Amino acid sequence: MSPTRELALQIAAEASQLVSRLKRPIEIHTAFGGMAKATALNKFRRGDPKILVATPGRLNDYLSEDDVRDRFKGMKTLILDEADRMLDQGFLPAIQQVLRALPPKNSPMGQWQGMCFSATIPPKMKEVLSHVLKKDHVSISTIDASEPPTLAKVPQFSVVIPTAVDTFGALFSLIKEEIYNTRGDSKIIVFGTTANLVALYSKIFENQTDLKIYELHSRMSQPARMKATEAFKAAKSGIVFATDGEMILPLEILISGLTCTQSLDEEWTSLTSPLFYR
């Protein structure tokens, strides 16, 4: 399970590369919102899927179909990726519903293995982990305890803007300085709080800089978001304006050449979001 469709697609792509080296091909399927449910579900029914990468909501849609749910009786592994992110986005009820629909961890059909990948382990996650992991499960950290957090290595600063009217001027100055410092090879992400704000600044900055402008928000179709995401990942430079819910590049998607991220927030408390510790 993955919190976002973009991450689900990346996981499926990486998995496809791995299984391509096997002598016997393994089918990998994806299930997430924003795409035609019937088409993907029919493909799942006709095929022989061994790996399914899905968001919680769409996985529940699949499990609501009796014939599809039966195909999960012999499942061997359940993985929660970016588990804390899923809980941050309010997926706890959906995850619990998935777990109720799946065979119990110690079902007569055989035990399945549970794995959880997460940057943090918030208290409410324990409600889920008790159903996914064994009591004597092993925790593995990929970060050396003596290594300073990434947060400490990245230069950061905040700008307090007196009024909303001053927002554009402040943002323009910051972006102009970043472009100057990188000699035009800037790859910048600007987070906005709403789709309207993102769309507005995208249009304004198209006429204010020579850099390519991209936008990502909930009012765009899924194919359009995917196209913009891939284009920005492949670009040497550019600016993408995005809402945090749609633009998950710095959180989950590998992106090279990123020089700066900026977040337009109305309240200081929002700076406790996952963006700032990753």
Image (tube, rainbow, N blue to C red):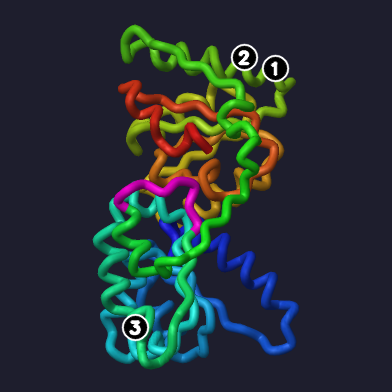
Q: CA distance from mark 3 to mark 2?
A: 56 Å
**Residue 119 lies within the magenta run:** yes
Q: Which residue occupies 36% across, 72% down?
A: 59
Looking at the rendered structure, the secondary structure element under dot 2 is helix
**Disc 2 designates what residue?**
177
Q: Could you tell me residue 167's position as x and y percent?
A: 40, 15
Q: Amino acid at mark 1?
A: Asn
Would you say residue 14 sits in the magenta stretch? no
* Mark 3 vs 1: CB contact within 8 A: no
Seen from the viewer's position, the closer of residues 172 and 30 is 30
Secondary structure type for disc 3: loop
Residue type, mark 3 in image: Pro
Looking at the image, is mark 3 or mark 2 earlier in the sequence? 3
What residue does disc 1 label? 181
Q: Which residue is mark 3?
A: 103
**Residue at the image position 46 percent from the left and 54 percent from the top:** 82
How far across and how far down the image is residue 153, in percent?
Answer: 63, 27
Q: Residues within 10 Å of mark 1 (few under 14, many from 20)?
A: few
How far across and how far down the image is residue 81, in percent?
48, 59
Question: Label 2 neighbourhood size at 10 Å, few (<14), some (14-19), many (20+)?
Answer: few
- Residue extending furthest toward the front: 136
Asked whether the viewer can see residue 199, the reply is no
Q: Residue at x 67, y 34 (%)?
A: 237
Q: Which range is magenta?
A: 117-124
Q: Is residue 155 above or below residue 96?
A: above
Q: Position of residue 93 (x, y in %)?
A: 24, 61
Q: Give yes or no for contact between labels 2 and 1 (Cβ–Cβ under 8 Å).
A: yes
Q: Main secondary structure of the magenta part?
A: loop
